[in-house]
Amino acid sequence: MAQSTWDEIFSAADARVARECSGFTTLIGLAVAPSFVVGGAVGDSKVYFLEEGGDFNDLSERQRKNPPIGGGCSWTTLFHLAEAKGSLLVVSDGVWKYAGYENLKDAAKEIPNAGVEGLRDCVLSRQGGSLPDDFSILGMKI
C-alpha cells in the first residue's frame, strides 16, 4: 500500500473521531501477508516484531504520540517488513508500559500459544490486581 493510502485511512479516522467522539485515541493499522507486514501508527500503542532467530524490534518506535487520533491533525508514521518470518505483537500502552520489555519479548516467543494471556497476568501481578490503563493485545505468527 502506498503512503498516500495510509495517509487517507488515518486522516479519515482522525476526522471521524474528532467529529463524532469528542475524544482522543491511538491507532495502529496493519496489512499482513505471508512474509510481509506494512502499516502505520499514531499515538502510544506499539507494534513489535520478534524475528525467527531472536531480534525483537519496535516497528512503531518513530511514531508520534501527539497529536493523537481525534485532534484533527494527527501524523502517521509508516513501517514495513519484507521477508518477515516470526511473531507480531500489537499492544496498547496499558500493556507495554506495565508489562516490561522482557515480558513482551517472552510473550512474543510464545505466540500463538499462551504468550498473550500471560501478559495480562503479568500486568495484574505488577499492579496489585487491577489494570492501570487500557489493555489491548493482538499477537500472530507470520
Image (cartoon, helix red, strand yellow):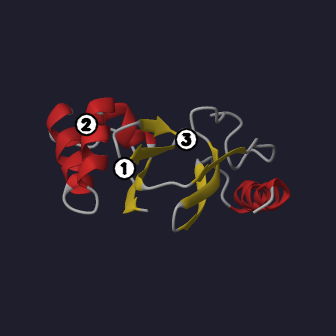
Say which amino acid is labelled 3.
Leu
Q: Residues within 10 Å of mark 1 (few under 14, many from 20)?
A: some
* Residue of label 2: 103
Left or right side of 8 for 44 = left
Left or right side of 84 for 140 = left
Say which amino acid is labelled 2.
Asn
Of the numbered discs in the image, which one, if any, rests on residue 135? Answer: 1
Q: Is residue 49 visible?
A: yes
Viewer-side residue, 43 vs 88: 88
Residue 89 point in image, percent of width and height? 41, 51
Residue at the (64%, 55%) spot, across then down: 39
Viewer-side residue, 65 vs 140: 140
Of mark 2 and mark 3, the one earlier in the sequence is: 3
Left or right side of 26 for 123 = left
Quadrant the N terminus occupies? bottom right
Q: Nearer the viewer, mark 2 or mark 3?
A: 3
> Looking at the picture, does residue 32 appear above or below residue 130?
below
The residues bearing labels 1 and 3 have C-alpha atoms spaced at a distance of: 19 Å
Say which amino acid is labelled 1.
Phe
Q: Is residue 128 visible?
A: no
- Mark 1 secondary-structure assignment: loop
Residue 96 point in image, percent of width and height? 38, 37
Q: Nearer the viewer, mark 2 or mark 1?
A: 2
Of the numbered discs in the image, which one, if any, rests on residue 59? Answer: 3
Q: Residues within 10 Å of mark 2 (few under 14, many from 20)?
A: some
Quadrant the C terminus occupies? bottom left
Left or right side of 130 for 18 = right
Of mark 2 and mark 1, the one earlier in the sequence is: 2
Labelled pair 1, 3 in contact (Cβ < 8 Å): no
> Looking at the picture, does residue 100 appear above or below residue 9?
above
Of mark 1 and mark 3, the one earlier in the sequence is: 3
